[in-house]
Image (cartoon, rainbow, N blue to C red):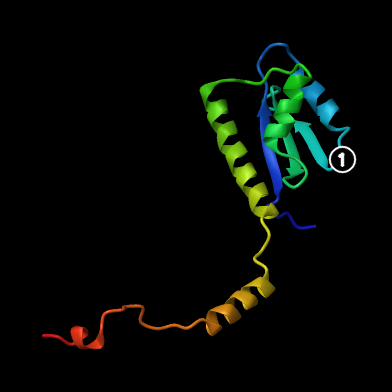
Amino acid sequence: MLPTDLDKIREIVFHELPAGQAERARELLDGLDSIQASTKLECRRTLVVQYRVTHYTLQGLEKALETQGFHLDNSLLQKLRRALVYFCENVQRENLVTNAPDAKSQQVFARVYEQHLHGDKDETPEEWREYK
């Protein structure tokens, strides 16, 4: 299956203390359907998660981890990165929910518009329009 814009690969960075949070979070997330989690070899505090935005969001995953007692890295850079990802994923999910316009209702509107009398709405008498 080819990856789409709906498939996300994100990093969750944990605080330094307590140690081993990324590995414990990986074990916890591995139990969920439609999600893959792995730790980064070069940075043991970072968890890489792959999911479909229709099933999960980074905000939801991080909130669930925090309720389980995990501590995320709250440096300014991480807060900014999170805020951008949260916003983008929320907009993408809202756009997926928004229904395409109904073609039949558009046809009805077009028929009503065609039947409506169109023309100049100016009620100024004709002789006053030509006055010079």
Disc 1 secondary structure class:
loop
User: How many C-alpha atoms fall within 10 Å of the one at disc 1: few (<14), some, or many (≥20)?
Assistant: few
Q: Is residue 88 above or below residue 95?
A: above
Q: In this view, does 128 lie to the left or right of 17?
A: left
Give the residue drawn at x 72%, y 21%: 66
Q: Position of residue 120 (x, y in %)?
A: 35, 82
In the picture, residue 41 is in which quadrant? top right
Q: Where is residue 108 in the image (x, y as percent from the top left)?
A: 64, 76
Quadrant of the snapshot with the C terminus: bottom left
Q: In this view, does 16 lie above or below 105?
A: above
Q: What residue type is labelled 1?
A: Asp
Q: Is residue 107 above or below residue 7?
A: below
Q: How many labels does the image show?
A: 1
Q: Name the residue under label 1.
A: 33
In the picture, residue 10 is in which quadrant? top right
Q: Nearer the viewer, residue 98 or 66?
A: 98
Q: Nearer the viewer, residue 15 or 43?
A: 15
Give the residue drawn at x 88%, y 32%: 31
Q: Is residue 78 above or below residue 123?
A: above
Q: Where is residue 91 in the image (x, y as percent from the top left)?
A: 61, 46
